Image: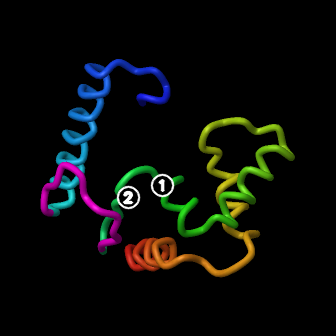
Amino acid sequence: MRLAGKQEGDIATAMAEAARWNLTLLRFHDAPEEDWPETRVEATYAVVADRLEDEFEASWPAMMERARALAAETGDWREKPGEGYRQAAREAEGGVPEFAAQVITAVKALR
């Protein structure tokens, strides 16, 4: 936010709002309430410490690289094109990282 030129007061407000939402969402899942939970996968929910894109940039760069390539090929400049991410996940070289594999396993178990 600082890099985007946001004022410190605006940053503090946004941080407080994000922490409030974290508590609310965790409460909905009867999970321990934390302002800033660490990345983890549970039976009925997953938490990403920051942004999902940052998690995948670190753990699955081939997928994110493919997602950017697909966006460029198709002219899709939306911030988070779901269908592009799905296709990139199918086409990315290398294995699926542990975090993504755990999310897939948890979702399948909910069926």
Residue 45 occupies quadrant = bottom left
At 79% from the left edge and 51% from the top edge, which residue is drawn? 70
Q: CA distance from mark 2 to mark 1?
A: 6 Å
- Asked if residue 44 is positioned above or below residue 17 in the image, the reply reads below
> Regarding mark 2 in the picture, which secondary structure is present there?
loop
Residue receiving disc 2? 48
The x and y percentages for residue 44 are 30, 68
Q: Position of residue 111 (x, y in %)?
A: 42, 74
Q: How is the image coloured?
A: rainbow
Q: Which residue is mark 1?
A: 52
Tags 2 and 1 touching, CB below 8 Å = yes
Highlighted magenta segment, given as a residue range: 32-42
Q: Amino acid at mark 1?
A: Leu
Identify the residue shown where x is 33% and y is 69%.
40
Q: Residue at x 30, y 74 (%)?
A: 43
Please identify the dominant SS of the magenta region. Answer: loop
Q: Residue at x 45, y 79 (%)?
A: 105
Q: Is residue 94 above or below residue 51?
A: below
Pick whichever, 30 or 16, lies toward us: 16
Q: Is residue 40 magenta?
A: yes
Answer with left or right where residue 54 lies relative to residue 6.
right
Query: Are there few (<14), some (14-19), or many (20+) residues within 10 Å of tag 1?
Result: few
Number of disc labels:
2
